[in-house]
Image (tube, rainbow, N blue to C red):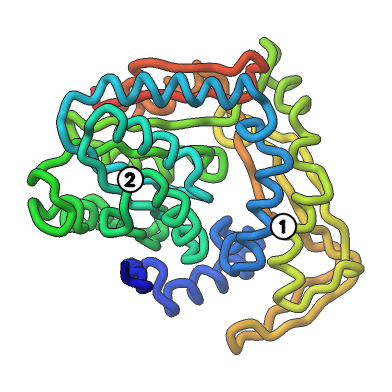
Amino acid sequence: MSSLVNVSIHASQSPENVRRDLLESLRTRRVNHKFHYDSIKQTNKWLALHQAHSPSRNDRDCAATYDRAFASAARTITSRSVHLVGLGCGGGQKDTRLLALLKARGKGISYTPSDVSVPMTLIARQAALSATPGEKCFPLVCDLATAEDLPEVLVTHPPSQGCGAAGHAPRATRLITFFGMIPNFEPDDILPKLAALVRRGDSLLFSANLAPWHDYEAGVKKVLPQYDNELTRDWLMTFLLDLGVEGGDGALTFKAERGVGSLRRIVARFRFRKTRRLVVEGRKVSFLAGENVRLFFSYRYTPELVRDELAKHGLLVCDQWITKSGEEGVFLCGRK
């Protein structure tokens, strides 16, 4: 077995484009979420945070909810060959469980773990090796928000090239996973791009953080402690500290507030108490006392809001699984 791993890197994550996006984040005082996963250090901090606070890791019912969704998705696919595309693959644990189910049903499987972070795609690939061999894993580093040609890229990516190294038929059914990603995007920005990847006959398995209780606003406030904690603070602050900001320059706060339309979200902002001047990528950057930098946001949905948002972009929810806590939901979708 070769000790080499081939990773495809899309132009959206080329050095010049990453530099552009970083400078734009600093200019607008709105940090692109991808910069929280940029380094191995940040990736490891996120994985530790996920292990400690993610309901899918700490709530048996949540894990069982995902398992029910995975089993149903595996049953609905009738084709012999499946290409699993993990968008925002994270550590790949959920994708690996799904791959194992597909394999158990006799499917020919291939896997594209995709993320903005090289370390994250490699971690997901490593996890998937328990279910599928390395020659059928094709890590793809890309920025989903800016990779305009991603539908074409996935057609020509190795699993879809026909028989050969991947050993699949010319048109494998595509099963796209998008776990825990939608909260960190403006829905009208990301959902058209997501919908463009789902062909007729393909499936999308999608999860969203939900606001529990019938009172939507109160439900969003209830989950605030999942964000306002030491591990999350440490992870988010790494971006600023690595730029040269010091912890004493200001304070990080979390707040539940209104987002677009009727949606609500949790927002993390760093407010500078004193001026900090930096040089980033050869550019002078000044944060003045009293300024805020938005480091992070996470939308919270209800099942009804999920269905409504997806329907706007031609995606139909075929089935759904909601945790008993009401804090997380998994949705199986296809084209209308």
Residue 161: x and y in percent read: 12, 55
| Contact between labelled residues 2 and 1, with CB atoms less than 8 Å apart | no
Q: Depth check: 68 or 229 in front?
A: 68
Residue 9 visible: no
Answer with left or right where residue 332 lies relative to residue 105. right
Residue 233: x and y in percent read: 79, 53
Q: Amino acid at mark 2?
A: Val
Q: Find residue 236 and name its label.
A: 1
- Disc 1 to disc 2, how far (Cα)? 27 Å
**In the rendered image of this protein, does residue 286 appear above or below residue 93?**
below
- Disc 2 secondary structure class: strand
> In the image, which is nearer the foreground, mark 1 or mark 2?
2
Please tell me which residue is depicted at 38% across the width and 22% down the height of the picture. 71
Q: Quadrant of the N terminus?
A: bottom left
Residue 14: x and y in percent read: 40, 74
Please tell me which residue is depicted at 23% across the width and 52% down the height of the picture. 154
Answer with left or right where residue 122 lies relative to residue 24. left
**In the rendered image of this protein, does residue 230 appear above or below residue 209?**
below
Please tell me which residue is depicted at 37% across the width and 36% down the height of the picture. 100
Q: Which one is earlier in the sequence, the residue at label 1 or at label 2?
A: 2
The residue identified by callout 2 is: 85
The quarter holding residue 104 reads: top left
Please tell me which residue is depicted at 9% across the width and 51% down the height of the picture. 162
**In the rendered image of this protein, does residue 216 appear above or below residue 4?**
above
Q: Quadrant of the C terminus?
A: top left
- Disc 1 secondary structure class: helix
Q: Amino acid at mark 1?
A: Leu
Q: Depth check: 7 or 38 in front?
A: 7
